[in-house]
Image: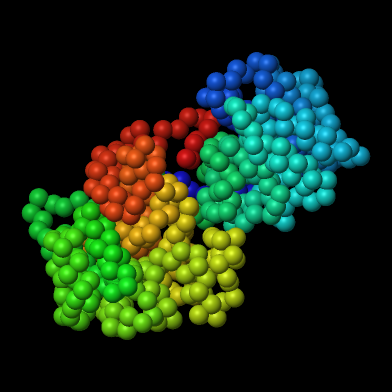
């Protein structure tokens, strides 16, 4: 599992070592790991180390020192190195080491940012080491002009040249992932000690590229993480598996209240997602026309036009494909929530739910739906606010509702009222298609139903006292994303329809279940790739 931390948590973990006078040792470890990561990236792109060029944009703090020391290491390996100092008070020891290694230095003060940007952008590698984890509010003044100019020059670049962010891209908030422009998008972020939360949440993840962690010796001092992400071995361990004497009822029964006369396909896709995700039985409740379509498309589903109270299930899925005029369906959705059973509530059900919910209710909005939900509860967020600060928004929504909230997006975030947050980015942009969210709701509903009385076995934390509803939702998001990627791969990386996601789920499930703890999280001592 990947554990991510706020900048404050990282700095607190560093403090015992700083108190022992090991600050320079930490910086050397970080810089050495970063240099090795740059070299590995060069080789992966078919570039030789000797004779290649690197330009490092540095600030005044330790982040700039990390960049200068890394560039000094690279100079010793034969790279042509240039530094642009955005502040006169650069890290003195690191700057001296860089100059001893033969690096050329340009000072931004008094120079034209555009001219320095042109030279920097010509390098094979551009290292962004201007702002670190403690920075707030982004770049300013001539440093902002320089980075904006470099970013513009590199927008249409071709060939193997690439950008590396030192710890995190300057302008990305380490804690929240919020972005203050300008930001130089990185192809690779080399981060120190542990992953930063802001690198695993949108919009910060948009600028991070691939993320690698360099251990520097603070790991034993780290507190519980701010955010987690499941990896292969975690997913394999969490998947439910039927026992030898399992039957359809012991494998879970999911009740589905979805679809409407206007959107009957949503019910079909939700049922298909659930069936493909291992549930023992699906019971559908809805209008006769929709029930007929579900029967034709999914003959395994037991269909009814009755009430929630007359159906024995282990969990409910409500809301997909429903609108404000679907009064009977909305009443069924409210009845499902009031049943006290686990519920995944999607789309049209969100405006109809009570203001106070419980953690076993999993809400699955996109950014617009989340903004509307928060406004209904007294918040002021609009869709733009949610998209600009997804991590803060999903946490706030879980606090406001008392529910487990899954915010769909390129990076899907799941927040529990306890404060636990998961981040999954397993999919493909082709998942942005009509009906994809209905399939996701079906997958999560199936997992909730399969949890049954033994829900604790889903827990990602040994001995966890709280039922891990967020873990189950994050597992569903990961399976859904991987199935979308698999479906796209069958189309040579091209577009997919929502039905293709459901079709790919069983094989995706099978591949995940075969993953073992051994080899699923290989790491070397210098660099830990996150994705």
Q: How far across and how far down the image is residue 192, in percent?
A: 59, 40
Residue displayed at 50% across by 67% down: 368
Please state which of residues 183 and 504 is positioned toward the viewer in this rendering: 504
Quarter residue 254 falls in? bottom left
Q: Residue 281 location, x and y as percent?
A: 16, 63
Residue 343 vs residue 29: left or right?
left
- The figure's colour scheme reads rainbow
Task: Report the residue at 39% width, 46% height from top.
Answer: 495
Q: Is 334 drawn above or below residue 428 in the view shown?
A: below
User: Residue furthest toward the left?
Assistant: 245
**In this image, 520 relative to 187: left or right?**
left
- Residue placed at 28% from the left, 74% from the top? 261
**Residue toward you, 522 or 377:** 377
| Of 333 and 62, the residue lying toward us | 333
Q: Residue furthest right?
A: 110
Q: Position of residue 459 (x, y in %)?
A: 33, 56
**Residue 235 visible in the snapshot:** no
How many numbered discs, if any? 0
> Left or right: where does residue 496 sit relative to residue 384?
left
Residue 200 visible from this viewpoint: yes
Quarter-of-image position of residue 70: top right
x and y, in percent, of residue 471 in the image? 36, 57
Residue under the point 14% across and 68% down: 302
Q: Is residue 418 left or right of residue 24?
A: left
């Amino acid at each position: 599992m990947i554990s991510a931390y706020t900048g404050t948590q990282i700095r607190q973990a560093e403090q015992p070592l700083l108190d022992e006078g090991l600050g320079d040792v930490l910086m050397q470890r970080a810089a050495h790991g970063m240099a090795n990561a740059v070299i590995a990236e060069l080789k992966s792109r078919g570039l030789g180390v000797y004779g290649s060029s690197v330009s490092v944009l540095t600030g005044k703090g330790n982040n700039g020192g990390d960049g200068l020391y890394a560039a000094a290491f690279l100079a010793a390996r034969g790279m042509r190195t240039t530094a642009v100092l955005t502040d006169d008070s650069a890290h003195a020891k690191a700057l001296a080491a860089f100059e001893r290694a033969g690096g050329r230095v340009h000072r931004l003060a008094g120079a034209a940012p555009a001219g320095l940007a042109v030279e920097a952008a010509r390098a094979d590698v551009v290292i962004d080491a201007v702002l670190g984890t403690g920075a707030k509010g982004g770049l300013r003044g001539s440093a902002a002009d320089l980075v904006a100019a470099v970013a513009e020059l590199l927008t249409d670049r071709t060939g193997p040249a690439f950008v590396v962010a030192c710890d995190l891209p300057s302008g990305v908030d380490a804690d929240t992932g919020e972005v203050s422009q300008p930001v130089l998008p990185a192809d690779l972020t080399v981060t120190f000690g542990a992953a930063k939360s802001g690198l695993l949440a949108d919009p910060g993840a948009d600028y991070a590229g691939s993320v690698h962690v360099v251990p520097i010796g603070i790991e034993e001092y780290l507190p519980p993480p701010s955010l987690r992400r499941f990896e292969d071995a975690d997913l394999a361990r969490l998947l439910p598996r039927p026992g030898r004497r399992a039957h359809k009822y012991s494998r879970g029964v999911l009740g589905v209240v979805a679809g409407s006369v206007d959107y009957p396909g949503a019910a079909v896709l939700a049922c298909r997602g659930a069936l493909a995700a291992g549930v023992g039985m699906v019971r559908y409740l809805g209008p006769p026309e929709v029930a007929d379509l579900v029967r034709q498309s999914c003959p395994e589903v037991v269909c009814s036009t009755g009430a929630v109270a007359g159906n024995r299930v282990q969990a409910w899925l409500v809301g997909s494909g429903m609108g404000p005029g679907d009064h009977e369906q909305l009443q069924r959705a409210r009845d499902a929530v009031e049943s006290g059973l686990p519920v995944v509530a999607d789309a049209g059900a969100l405006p109809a739910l009570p203001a106070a919910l419980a953690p076993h209710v999993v809400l699955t909005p996109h950014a617009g739906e989340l903004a509307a939900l928060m406004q209904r509860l007294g918040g002021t967020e609009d869709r733009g606010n949610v998209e600009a600060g997804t991590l803060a928004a999903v946490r706030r929504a879980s606090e406001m509702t008392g529910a487990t909230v899954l915010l769909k997006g390129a990076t899907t975030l799941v927040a529990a009222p306890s404060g636990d947050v998961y981040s999954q980015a397993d999919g493909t942009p082709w998942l942005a298609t009509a009906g994809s969210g209905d399939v996701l709701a079906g997958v999560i509903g199936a997992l909730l139903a399969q949890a049954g009385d033994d829900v604790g076995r889903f827990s990602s934390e040994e001995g966890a006292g709280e039922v891990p509803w967020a873990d189950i939702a994050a597992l569903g998001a990961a399976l859904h994303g991987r199935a979308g990627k698999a479906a796209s791969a069958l189309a040579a990386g091209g577009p997919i329809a929502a039905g293709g996601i459901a079709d790919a789920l069983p094989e995706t499930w099978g591949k995940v279940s075969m993953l073992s703890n051994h080899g699923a999280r290989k790491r070397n001592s210098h660099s830990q790739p996150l994705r």
